[in-house]
Amino acid sequence: MLIKIPKGWELPEKEATPESVYMNRRKFLVSTGIAGAYSLAFLSGCNKMGENGPFVKPLSEWPLSEEEQRVYPPSRNTAYKLDRPLTDEAVAARYNNFYEFSTNKDDVYKKAEKLSARPWTLEVTGLVEEPKTFDPDELLRLMPIEERLYRLRCVEAWAMAVPWTGFPLKALIDHVRPLSKANYIRFVSFDLKSVGNVLMFRAPWPYPEGLTLQEGLNPLTLLVTGIYGHPLPNQHGAPLRLIVPWKYGYKSIKSIVKIEFTQERPKTFWNTLTPDEYDFMANVNPKVPHPRWSQATERMIGTKKIYRTTLCNGYDEYVSHLYPKTQKG
Ligand SMILES: Nc1nc2c(c(=O)[nH]1)N[C@H]1C(S)=C(S)[C@@H](COP(=O)(O)O)O[C@H]1N2
Ligand SMILES: [Mo]
């Protein structure tokens, strides 16, 4: 059974990270011995690459495939507006949740260098008429790629505002044509063993997430291939991740290898570990506090500016029809 965090236990400081504190308490993740030597080598290389380091490369420094050359820089769909400044790229690139690599947000960008995002295959399977396996370039060729500015709200009460490049998941759903029995979509990340990380705890690895089919068909739901006008760096979930901007960040699963259409609601990572703290639905809601902290406000990473959190992260008008009973009033 999972050990419960004692009642009344509080975060030592505002920057503390509930998900990772939880993970550390359980002594969850161990990397191989190679990792330490690797990061030292990385750090010395870092100095030579300028103050931003290799984690913030402009488009001109990316080795682009032919399809990527066609797509980037992406054209922006201006229908999606922000109510606040964009988060600084270097800040977003060094503050990441990616538990396959680290429980510390500030070293994910280094540890995720181990992931090799190309070649990559995405299997789309389950209750569909045309199951199919794609490589990232095929998706860039077949899908309507655009850039959108979205807010992202983590359940830990930090937030960011970034330009994503990608396409509506609906375009892929239409391509494979779900059967009428399909009610849910299950997403799965890569296998940890493939990057040499070892697990010593029970968790539903590889990281799974899920949406209802209707949520997946919503025009806001994006499959993302890039950020800040270039392909995704590993720490943001290369080569392909989900972004569901009206839900807490843990739904926005990174580095997806499989998308499966199912009849039953799939098991998901955080909901399986701690169901009373992280629900399957995970719609952003300032009025429903997390058992250990308020969700009324959010802190922008970088500027530390505090904003009031809004229902469905400000995307209520696009999605409220999906939740007629729970979200009204
Ligand atoms: N595979 C995988 N996807 C994941 C996570 C993870 O640990 N593993 N963390 C989630 C959480 S909690 C958040 S807030 C976002 C963070 O995305 P970012 O690091 O690109 O900002 O990724 C989500 N996707
Ligand atoms: Mo998160």
Image: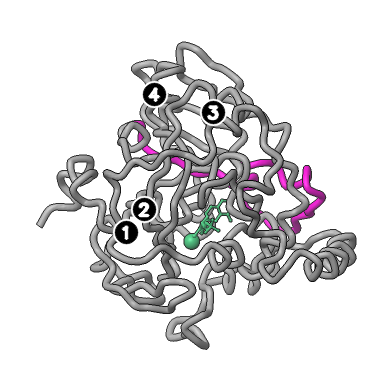
Spatial separation of the CA atoms under disc 1 and disc 2: 5 Å
Residue at x 53% of width, y 33% of height: 71
Tag 3 and tag 4, C-beta contact below 8 Å: no
Looking at the figure, which quarter contains the N terminus?
bottom right
- For disc 4, does the CB lie below 8 Å from ligand 1? no
Q: Is residue 82 left or right of residue 326?
A: right
Mark 2: amino acid: Lys
Q: Is residue 134 above or below residue 228?
A: above
Task: State the extent of the magenta-drawn residues as a range.
Answer: 189-213
Nearer the camera: disc 4 or disc 1: 1
Q: Which residue is mark 4?
A: 182
Quadrant position of residue 66: top right
Q: Which mark is residue 284?
A: 1
The earlier-in-sequence mark between 2 and 4 is 4
Residue 72, given in percent of the width and then of the height, sits at 54, 38
Q: Is residue 233 above or below residue 136?
A: below
Quadrant position of residue 240: top right
Residue at x 73% of width, y 32% of height: 119
Mark 4: amino acid: Ala
Mark 1: amino acid: Val
The earlier-in-sequence mark between 1 and 3 is 3
Spatial separation of the CA atoms under disc 1 and disc 3: 30 Å
Extreme residue toward the top, this view: 129
What coloring was used for the rendering?
Answer: one colour
Tag 1 and tag 2, C-beta contact below 8 Å: yes
Q: Which mark is residue 247?
A: 2
